[in-house]
Each structure stands twice: as C-alpha cells, then as structure tokens.
Amino acid sequence: MASKEHLAAKQLVIDEIKGKLEKATSLVLIDYMGINVEEATNMRKKLREADVDFVVYKNTLMNRAIQGTEFESIAPLLNGPSAFAISYDDAVAPARVLNGVIKEYKKMAFKGGVVEGTYFDAAGIEAIAALPSRDELIAKFMGSIQSPLSKLVRTFKAIADKEQEA
C-alpha cells in the first residue's frame, strides 16, 4: 500500500503536468530511446532555444493528467519510453525541432501528438514538422505583398523618368 507522502508526491507531478498542459498549444510525444547523453543535451538545447519544454514523465502520471483535457487523445500512445515536447507559443516548434534532431541522429521516432487541439499520429506530426515557422510564414507573406508594390513603384518611377526626359 502506497504511503500518503508517495501519493502526495505523485499528485504534485500530476498537477505540474496539468499546469503545463493548460498553457500549451501543442504536445508531441517521441520514443527517445537510443540517444546518448551528448545527443540528449544537444537536443534539449535546441528545444530550449525554440521555447519548447522537453520532459519525461511516467506514462501513468501523464495518463492521469490528460484525463478531461484536449490532450486526452494521446492516451493510447502512452506505452514504452515516452518523452514529451510541450510548446506554449509556436505550435509547430516541437515537431519541427524534433524532426531535425531525428534526421540528424537517425534515432528516436515520433509517436504522435496534439497540435492546437487536434490529434495527429506519427505521420501527421512529421507532416506538421515540414511546415515553416510562424515567422517564416509572415516573412513570405510580407515578401509576396511587397513584390507587386515594388514593381508598381518602379513602373511609376520609369514613367516619371521618361516624362522628365521628354
């Protein structure tokens, strides 16, 4: 029989997980087996730079924490070694960073995840990882707006220059 202190400690972890998930825009699960300490440290650094929390929790505690949340759909994935990448701002960041790490080390694998309330299997998370970041999308959008305007300005300038020459 578990002691009250042991149960209280478990409840603290469950509450910690719930607190993170309440603020999260995405959660990506990976099977992290096969990486060494140096690779894990490098991966954590890349995730930290992208403002992504990378944590390992017991599957049973995670299962209790996700009950009744938008992340409940990952419950069937909670078997074997699981690590969790949680993002609070850029929903695509965990998938994108982990995809790069998986390709670099040729180890680990996506299990699935939830991005902005929608469940994705491993293939879906890989597809999401291929999406550009929010900043890249904004830059591309601004470039596409700027290009026709620049062309229009150059055309008007050419017309004005011709009129001045005449």
Image: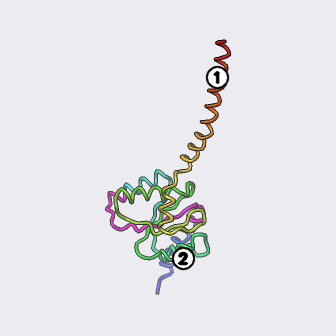
Q: Is residue 35 magenta?
A: yes
The quarter of the rendered structure image containing the C terminus is: top right
The mark lying in front, picked from 1 and 2, is 1
Mark 1 and 2 residues: CB-CB less than 8 Å, in contact? no
Where, by quadrant of the figure, is residue 65 drawn?
bottom right
> How many residues crowd around disc 2 within 10 Å: few (fewer than 14), some, or many (20 or more)?
some
Task: Point out the tag, 1 or 2, that comes first from the N-terminus.
Answer: 2
In the structure shown, which secondary structural element does the residue marked by tag 1 occupy? helix
The residue lying toward the viewer, choosing from 77 and 51, is 77
> How many residues crowd around disc 1 within 10 Å: few (fewer than 14), some, or many (20 or more)?
few
Where, by quadrant of the figure, is residue 41 drawn?
bottom left
- Is residue 77 placed above or below 32 in the rendered structure? below
The residue lying toward the viewer, choosing from 140 and 4, is 140
Q: Is residue 150 left or right of residue 120?
A: right
- Is residue 24 placed above or below 79 in the rendered structure? above
The mark found on residue 137 in the picture is none
Residue 92: horizontal and vertical position, in percent? 53, 57
The mark found on residue 157 in the picture is 1
Q: Residue at x 64, y 22 (%)?
A: 157
Q: Residue at x 52, y 67 (%)?
A: 113
* Total numbered circles: 2
- Is residue 80 placed above or below 101 in the rendered structure? below
In the structure shown, which secondary structural element does the residue marked by tag 2 occupy? helix
Residue 160: horizontal and vertical position, in percent? 67, 19
The mark found on residue 64 in the picture is 2
Q: Is residue 41 magenta?
A: no
What amino acid type is highlighted by mark number 1? Lys
- Is residue 19 placed above or below 42 in the rendered structure? below
Which colour style is shown? rainbow
What amino acid type is highlighted by mark number 2? Arg
